Structures are given as structure tokens and as C-alpha cells.
Image (cartoon, rainbow, N blue to C red):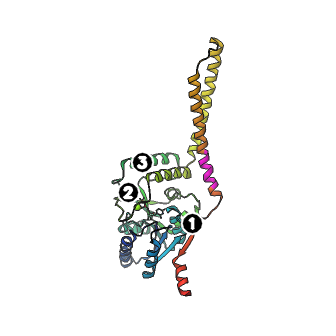
Amino acid sequence: MSMVSIIVPCYNEKEALPYFFPEIRKVANILFATKGLSFEFLFVNDGSRDGTLELLREFAAEDDRVRYISFSRNFGKEAAMYAGFQHAKGDYVVLMDADLQHPPAMLEEMYLAVKEEGYDIAAARRVSRKGEPPIRSFFARCFYRLINKISKAEFEDGASDFRMFSRQAVEAILELGEVNRFSKGIFGWVGFNTKWIPYENVERVAGETNWSFWKLFLYSLDGIIAFSTAPLAIASVVGILFCVVAFIWMIAIIVKTLVWGDPVAGYPTLACLLLLIGGSIQLSLGILGQYLAKTYLETKHRPIYIIGETDEMQKQERSAL
Ligand code: UDP
Ligand code: MG
């Protein structure tokens, strides 16, 4: 009998989980009855401060398909997904948000794609950005256009993290042990056949999103730095262009001085040039610094997350009493 692991990253999801858990159980029970699939629900509590952990303990006590990992603090969704992949035992692994924005009913179609149609990854893709602020959609589109130009990994616009992976794809993803994780890029980078399944965006059932516009913007910069070195190349090209222009200009100035003499003029030109060149040097240094910072963080080889509690630890503690 095949097993499906459902990984659910949770950060302050006390309000959404009581809706999510019965829904996913319903779908799991149907798939168990019709397809003979067994399930494990692997919740990753990403340092929630709202009693999510207590709720997960209850879930684990009432249903032995439930497992959980609880981090010692908030490490971010990327870390939570990685921890999920490392601990999932299933033949098929699914990533899913806790807020029911990812319809559990799609699981059957995903399973058929991976099991019977020969895909390694079945991923949900939003067909529209309805309900999203227009400015956010605009920047998102620009981001996808840009990153696909400058990176080798494929980035699909509207691709969500709601995906089912074959065991083989999971092992491949685990091979990428980088600290600065950008999953959308990692999933594309490992390759494999991906089936895109369209779905309509739905509102979160309860609780609040953890993403502000600013957070998303910084995240997209992370993605560019993690999956492309184009900004470094652009900085170099701009540098070369400046040199060429400066050289031609220099010759022009020498010729002009020899022919017409040297009246004191050109202060505005000088000021503009200084600003322009200073600015571009600053920008290049900044870009360089970003890559250096990421390299610095990677070379520390810090763990991606730290576990505070798991369902197994909890069980052992209880049996020791
Ligand atoms: N999440 C997480 N750690 C974080 C932020 C979010 O594990 O630091 C989880 C969150 O609990 C949810 C999923 O990631 O299950 C998606 O988060 P959210 O709904 O806030 O993002 P959105 O759907 O708005 O992109
Ligand atoms: Mg959400």
C-alpha cells in the first residue's frame, strides 16, 4: 500500500487549522477507501506564538496519522518545507498551506498525474490573480519575466507551493541543502516532468497572511540572487561601458583643449559625471555585497532549523511518566 505524506507548514494558524484538519481528513479517508492510499499528516510548527502547538498536540493525540515537528523559533516557510521533506516517510509527498487556499480536493488529480500519467511533480497553478492588489500583480509579472530571462531554472508564473512529489523528486530536492532556500527556484532547478493543474485562487479561511508587500519584494530579490548571477554581469558590463565612454570623452577633451585652449568651464558636466560614476560604483558594490553576504551565510553551515519538540518526543515523555 502506498503512503502519502502531507506536509503543512504552520505559523500562527490556530484559527485556520480547525477548518483545515477536518477537510484534509475527509479527502484522505475518501482516497483511502477508493484508491487504497494511506496518509500521514506532517505538521511543521514554525515557531507559532498563538497556541498552534497545543492544537497540534491534540490532533496527534486523537489521530495517529498525525505527526508534528515544532521549531524552537520562527525559521520561515522555506525552512518548514525543508524539515517536512526531511521527515516525510511517504512514497508521495505533498506540500500544502494550512489556510485552505490550497483545495484538498485536488489531491486525487495530483495523485493520478504522479502515479499513472508518469509525472514526477504535480503542481497547482493559479489561473488568475483575482483578489490581489493590482500593483502586486504587476510586480509579480515583472519578477517572473525578469527571472526567467536571467536564470537557468524555470519559474512558472502563478505556480504555488501546493504540489505532490514522487519520492525520487523529494530525494533530489533534499540534495540541495543550501541555507538560503528559494523553493520556487529549487523545484524548477531539479527538473523532472511537472504537470500544471490550474485552480482558482481562494481566500484564506481564517487568520492573516504573513506576507507584506515589502517582505515579498525582499523575497523576490533573494530569489534572483539565489538563482542568477546576472546582476554581477550587468554591473561589470556597466563598468566597461563607463570606461569606454570615459576614454572617448578623454580624447575629445584633449583635442578640444589643444585646439581651443582651456577656458574654465564645464563645472556642471563634471558634477554630473561625478554623481553618475559615484552612483554606479555604489550600485555595483551593493550588488557585490549581496552576493558576498549570501556566500558568507552559506559558508557558516548553520542548520536550516532547530527542533524544539516533536510528536515522538512528546510520546516518549508521556510513556516515561
Ligand atoms: N508559514 C510558515 N512560516 C512563516 C510564514 C508562513 O510556516 O514564517 C506558513 C503559513 O502558516 C501557511 C503558509 O506558510 O501555512 C503560507 O502562508 P500565508 O498563507 O501567510 O501566505 P500566502 O498564502 O498569503 O502566500
Ligand atoms: Mg495563504
Q: Nearer the viewer, residue 218 or 174?
A: 218
- Which residue does the image show at 40% across and 61% down from the upper left? 208
Where does residue 98 sit, x and y in percent of width and height? 41, 67
Q: Main secondary structure of the magenta part?
A: helix
Determine the residue positioned at 56% across, 44% down. 231
Amino acid found under the numbered disc labelled 2? Arg
Q: Nearer the viewer, mark 3 or mark 1?
A: 1
SS at circle 3: helix
Residue on which disc 2 sits = 126
Residue 44, x across and y down, in percent: 49, 70
Can you say whether 32 is above or below 122 in the image? below
Residue 119 appearing in the image: no
On whether residue 293 falls in the magenta region, the answer is yes
**Dot placed on the residue nearer the N-terminal end, 2 or 3:** 2
Q: Which residue is under mark 3? A: 141
Q: Tell me: 105 left or right of 193.
A: left
